[in-house]
Image: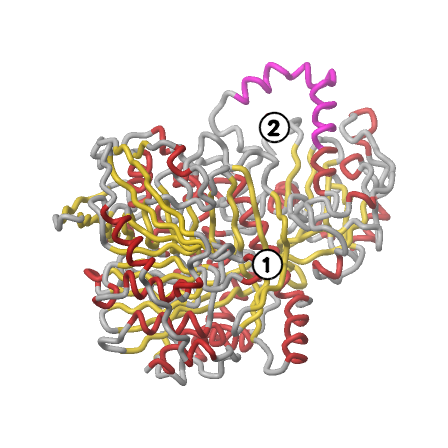
Amino acid sequence: MCSGYRDIPILGVCLGHQALGYVHGAQIVHASEPVHGRMSEIEHNGCRLFSDIPSGKQSGFKVVRYHSLVIDAQSLPKEIVPIAWTTSTGTHSFLESQNSDFTSDACESQIRATIGYDTFSPELNNGTSWSFSRSREVKKRKILMGIMHSTRPHYGIQFHPESIATCHGRKIFENFREMTRDYLRSTFFKERHAFYTACMQVPGVSQLFGVPRNGPLEYSEDTLPFRETSRMQILGKVDEKNCVSISSLLSFPESSGRVKHLKLKWRKFDRLAAQLGGARNIFCKLFGANKAENTFWLDSSSVEKKRARFSFMGGKGGSLWKQMTFILSDESDIALKSGGYLSIEHAQGVTKSMYLENGFLDFMNQELQSFLYDEKDFEGLPFDFYGGYIGYIGYNLKVECGMLSNRYKSKTPDACFFFADNFVVIDHQYDDVYIMSVQEGSTTNTTWLDDVEQKLLHLEASPVSKLEKQTSQPSTIFSCEAGFLAEKSREQYINDVHKCLEYIKDGESYELCLTTQMRKKVGDIESLRLYLHLREKNPAPYAAWLNFSNENLCICCSSPERFLRLDRNGVLEAKPIKGTIARGRTEEEDEQLKLQLQYSEKDQAENLMIVDLLRNDLGRVCEPGSVHVPRLMDVESYATVHTMVSTIRGKKRSNINAVDCIRAAFPGGSMTGAPKLRSMELLDSLESCSRGIYSGSIGFFSYNQTFDLNIVIRTIVIHEGEASIGAGGAIVALSNPEDEYDEMILKTGAPAKAVVEFQ
């Protein structure tokens, strides 16, 4: 420990706890088993850090643990005192531990008063009356969960007080705040005030202790479990690429500098959608001609339980329409580079190309910043898309969000968007239809609105097809039976799962979302009909159809998962899915499988880790204290699977823009694992090809900077005569390799079955 920092109050969490023991001579060793996203009951010695927090079995003090390494309690030096440990060697699942509302302090009502020592008082030898002989006895039986220095104001805890499921986590931080405040007021601090003030002015002051770079410390376990750090960052090096930039304040060399004044005109038709045969018939009659070239459809084809409400559809039309296609350059594989080539096709047929040194997201931000509009134009509209960009962001754009490189180049463009200026909206809750037209300046042309209104008023509902009358049954045809060829064999995939488990055991990650691809030559398939078939067999709230004709690319997506939404009130929402099981063949079997998923410790651990990850992601761009979890581990049922879904929300900070929010959270944590950056590095080393569009996001960026994006799963990507389906699953310490392979195959079932049935 650097002598200059020995008197600064420190609370080390997880890796910080291990570092505190390590620098004083304790040994860091493998735990008897990795424990990630699982809970333990805690005993403590009543020191002030745990003031007013209960202790022991059934006391209500349960905490979340994320670690596979531990301090060897037998190796503790005499100056390090144990202050907390597990009550037993076992762990608990989350639902086993909770019976009330899920909040970050769910157990706060169970607080019991305990003894509080003035642990920063030098007169009390750091406040401990703990006998070393008793501590040695305890260390033989329990897992060490907390330590403190006997004479310095340094503490460490192995568990994570900031986790959504840890009881009394807030109280621990409050206690440490009060201890620090008292310490700073003490005479001892005043004598060193000048030195402390000078230290705080020195760059790299975060280097609180000199941890050897090659020491046996866990790479990814930081004081916050999902804030990305490397060993060098722990030593104080600032990783500027991981910082959230306020890009709205920057000027970009690619900017045209032209401000666009947009004017929105719209018309509403009450209770009309069902009369016209629903969204399917409206899309096919208005936009389905010529193989539905250059069309889009953000399709809420599953609206049960208010999972989704609006569908947006349109095609090439008005004078503002354009298509943007972005391809990362080969140089993007080099550290700190994410540039690429952008091609823009305008409505008039003119195509322009340029190199974007700062990447696609910076350019998208520049575009969104260039729009001026009158909020009165969309007063009374119940949705948040008023015109703007609709398309997808591919997984490889992770290099614009903190990752240093991509191992594989995508076969498809890394991002592709239409600027939608004329489009139709369907409100599934009230059955209303809206037609929307965005124009520039003072233009008052209503030709498109007039034309579409007439088409709608004269559109006849199509008869219900036999396909629509069928009820969905659990999928019995999987990718291998449908003629798809896997990038990896069953043996190879299972072997990769074993490698993931080794990484987890060694502390490199908590959770790794391992994926692979299935491919099949389909030739000149009728892609729209295939999508219509998929949406009938596997309806989903965040489904989508995209046809980029110039790229020979169609996307048939039946995703049940929202990545991130920003609404007009500045509220961000993520809805990650972690935990999936097949539907049953009978009502009784189906209910049993649903309960099996709900009470699975493994699936709860998966979901909990991603919830904590996304709370951290949103915390980077949201107002302090606003991030919360209104729904935790709900089980939702779809045509072929049950899934475990959580909802995380927060209030965006006023100095943050839409693209900043994407940078903070992309790719979705449910498709990476945690911690995110290190997990993606490991996955790149294991996977044999680029994920491409799979694991990315489809959705919209409205010109007023609202957005709504899904996670691209349960999706068929048709590109240059080949259909591909991506699938995978989260590998955690409790994973069984054979079961993980079966789950991956299960997720290919609905899209693969749609292809084989359609053909």
Kindly report the secondary structure that dominates the magenta region of the rendered protein. Answer: helix
- Name the residue rendered at 76%, 53% in the picture: 100
**Picture coordinates of residue 239, whole percent (x, y):** 42, 38
Q: Secondary structure at mark 2?
A: helix
Three-letter residue code for mark 1? Asn
For the image shown, how many numbered marks are present on the structure?
2
- Residue receiving disc 1: 607
Q: Residues within 10 Å of mark 2 (few under 14, many from 20)?
A: some
Q: Earlier in the sequence, mark 1 or mark 2?
A: 2
Looking at the rendered structure, which numbered label has been put on residue 5? 2
Q: Residues within 10 Å of mark 1 (few under 14, many from 20)?
A: many
Three-letter residue code for mark 2? Tyr
Mark whose residue sits in front, 1 or 2 = 1
Q: Is residue 283 visible in the rendered structure shown here?
A: yes
Q: Is residue 227 left or right of residue 723?
A: right
Q: Quadrant of the C terminus?
A: bottom left
Measured in 3D between alpha carbons, the distance from the residue under mark 1 to the one under mark 2, in whole angstroms, is 38 Å
Q: Quadrant of residue 413?
A: bottom left
**Picture coordinates of residue 286, whole percent (x, y):** 29, 61
Q: Nearer the viewer, residue 137 or 173?
A: 173
Q: Secondary structure at mark 1?
A: helix
Residue 330 versus residue 257 in the image, above or below: below
Q: Nearer the viewer, residue 539 or 155?
A: 539
- Name the residue rendered at 17%, 49% in the picture: 347
Report the colour scheme: secondary structure
Bounds of the magenta segment: 176-200
